[in-house]
Every structure is written in C-alpha cells, then in structure tokens.
C-alpha cells in the first residue's frame, strides 16, 4: 500500500514541511463568517506570496481558472509550486512567465496527439524548473487528504509502476488490519465507492460498459475489472451474490486473475458467448451497450 501525502508546506521563507497540528490551528483561525467573500482577481492574487504552493482546480482544458492564473502572472509572483490534476497550456504560461518553477501533476500536455509539453521539457531539461509526476489517482488523493485535514491517504495506484520509483515522497506500508487483498463486487460503481475500489484486488459489476465509472477507474488503478456481467446478481440484504445461479457469500474467493477461479472462467465464458452472438448479429450491438460484459 502506498501513502499519498497531502503536500502541505510552508511558504518559501522556510521551504520545510510544517507539523499538521500547526496547520490545523492556522485553518481554525480563518474567517468562516457568513458574509460576502467575493473579491477581485487582483485582490485574490494578493493573498498568494512568492514561493507559495498553489493548488489549481479543473483538469486539462476543463474548468481551468485562467483568469486567476493571468492575475498571478500580472502580479509578478515568482517561485510558485503549482499542483493540479492534469496540466495543459496553463502550465506553459506559468513556467514561461517565471511565476512558477515547480509543477506537481500527473500529466503535462494539451493532449495525447501533441505529446508532452515542449515548454515543460525545455524548462526541466535546462534546470529552470522542476516537474514532479504522480499518477492521476495519487494526485486526487493528495488533494483529498489535504481537504480532510489528514497527513496522508492510503492508495494502491502506483504500486509496481516506475512512477512510484520516481516519487520518494510516497511511502509503502502494509494494511494494519488484515494485510490481505480483497475483491469489490457491486451492481455498478460510483465515485462514492472509490475507497472500496482502492482496497479491492479486482472489480466485477453487473452493469456498465467500456466507459463506465468502474472500467475507467479500474484501468487507471491497474486492476482486473469485468463490467456488464448480466449473470451477476447482488443481494445487499444478505451480503451475498450469485453468478448464473452459482451462489456466493461474503469472504469467498472470487477472482485473483480473470481465469484463476471457477467464477472467473464462468464470467469469461459468458463474455465470449456474447461476443460470438454479436459477431453473428452485429446490428444487435447498438441496442445492448448497457449490458455488454467486458473485461477491462
């Protein structure tokens, strides 16, 4: 298990990590009164000091606070560390203007077609800036830890990857409760299930398709995932399930790899049958996307 630290640091005057009790006390002193707190971009930029860590919302070109980014550049801020889930042309502007010399993100590009940012490569390769790369999930969990006021969040998304080797800030640990890997089984998954999905060794859902929440998140986590298995029936009342009439109970071993168990083989047989049926009747695909069994 890997721990994703929230990354709360002091300003550039010290450059050191501050104790969490100090940060919580500072947070408690903030103005929480019910009043109009809307300010101009210039006033908002005045709250940011040179060398501060700045979290930027949005992702890639979606919901990017460009007005705030330009306000920081116009204010002449220097030495900022900017953290964002996925950085795009906003990062090019921050680096080229000199406002930022440290980017923390999981991807730095306008899109896969254009490749990695040339501005970022130039600044990093010439030593003008630093680029820390994390996984998408790790970035989200670091922000989540900071929002919850805790020092770290346990995740599994970077275990076994070379990204983990590049991040000495991440610390590996064993689960303090069981030390075992588990499997999440649900009709479908939603963002509320992220903790269970992180703890799961694999994911099996009765609903969903290639672009469902379970498929996308499992792919990022590097987990075995089968979605849209119509033969799967979940009984939340008894905390049990069945696949094509085969009863299962909580605690049973369901899936280590897709074909390592009887259930895994059965699910794959059902998926293969579906593929064969749709190859014979291709027109049936368009109307059955919501029930297609897929292995991601």
Image (cartoon, rainbow, N blue to C red):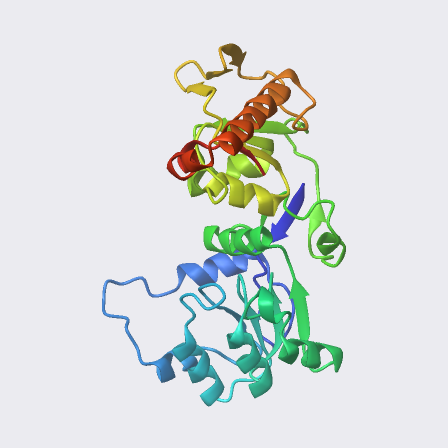
User: From where the camera sits, is residue 293 visible?
Assistant: no
Give the residue displayed 66% in from the left and 62% down from the top: 133
| Front position in the image: 282 or 225 | 282
Q: Quadrant of residue 100?
A: bottom right
Give the residue displayed 47% in from the left and 78% down from the top: 48
Name the residue at the left extreme: 35
User: From where the camera sits, is residue 111 visible?
Assistant: yes
Percent x, y of residue 178: 65, 26
| Front position in the image: 178 or 92 | 92
Name the residue at the front extreme: 280
| Front position in the image: 22 or 88 | 88
Percent x, y of residue 49: 51, 80
- The N terminus, quarter of image: top right
236 with respect to 198 (left or right): left
Give the residue displayed 63% in from the left and 80% down from the top: 119
Percent x, y of residue 180: 67, 27
Q: Is residue 43 above or below residue 146?
A: below
Count of all numbered marks drawn on residues in the image: 0
């Amino acid at each position: 298990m890997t721990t994703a630290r929230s990354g709360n640091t002091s300003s550039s005057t010290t450059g050191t990590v501050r104790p969490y009790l100090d940060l919580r006390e500072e947070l408690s002193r903030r103005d929480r009164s019910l009043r109009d707190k809307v300010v101009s971009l210039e006033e908002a930029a005045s709250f940011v000091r040179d060398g501060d860590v700045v979290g930027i919302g949005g992702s890639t070109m979606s919901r990017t606070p460009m007005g705030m980014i330009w306000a920081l550049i116009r204010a002449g801020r220097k030495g900022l560390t900017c953290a964002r889930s996925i950085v795009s042309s906003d990062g090019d502007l921050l680096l080229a203007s000199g406002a930022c010399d440290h980017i923390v993100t999981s991807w730095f590009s306008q899109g896969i077609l254009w490749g990695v940012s040339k501005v970022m490569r130039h600044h990093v390769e010439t030593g003008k800036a630093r680029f820390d790369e994390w996984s998408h999930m790790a970035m989200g969990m670091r922000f989540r830890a900071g929002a919850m006021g805790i020092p770290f969040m346990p995740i599994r998304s970077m275990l076994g990857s070379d990204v983990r080797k590049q991040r000495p800030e991440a610390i590996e640990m064993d689960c303090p409760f069981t030390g075992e890997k588990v499997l999440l089984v649900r009709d479908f998954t939603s963002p509320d299930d992220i903790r269970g999905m992180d703890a799961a060794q694999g994911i099996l859902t009765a609903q969903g398709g290639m672009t469902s929440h379970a498929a996308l998140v499992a792919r990022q986590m590097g987990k075995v995932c089968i979605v849209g298995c119509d033969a799967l029936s979940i009984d939340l009342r008894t905390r049990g399930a069945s696949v094509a009439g085969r009863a299962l109970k909580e605690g049973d071993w369901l899936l280590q790899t897709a074909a390592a168990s009887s259930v895994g083989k059965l699910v794959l047989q059902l998926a293969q049958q579906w593929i064969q049926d749709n190859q014979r009747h291709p027109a049936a695909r368009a109307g059955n996307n919501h029930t297609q069994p897929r292995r991601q």
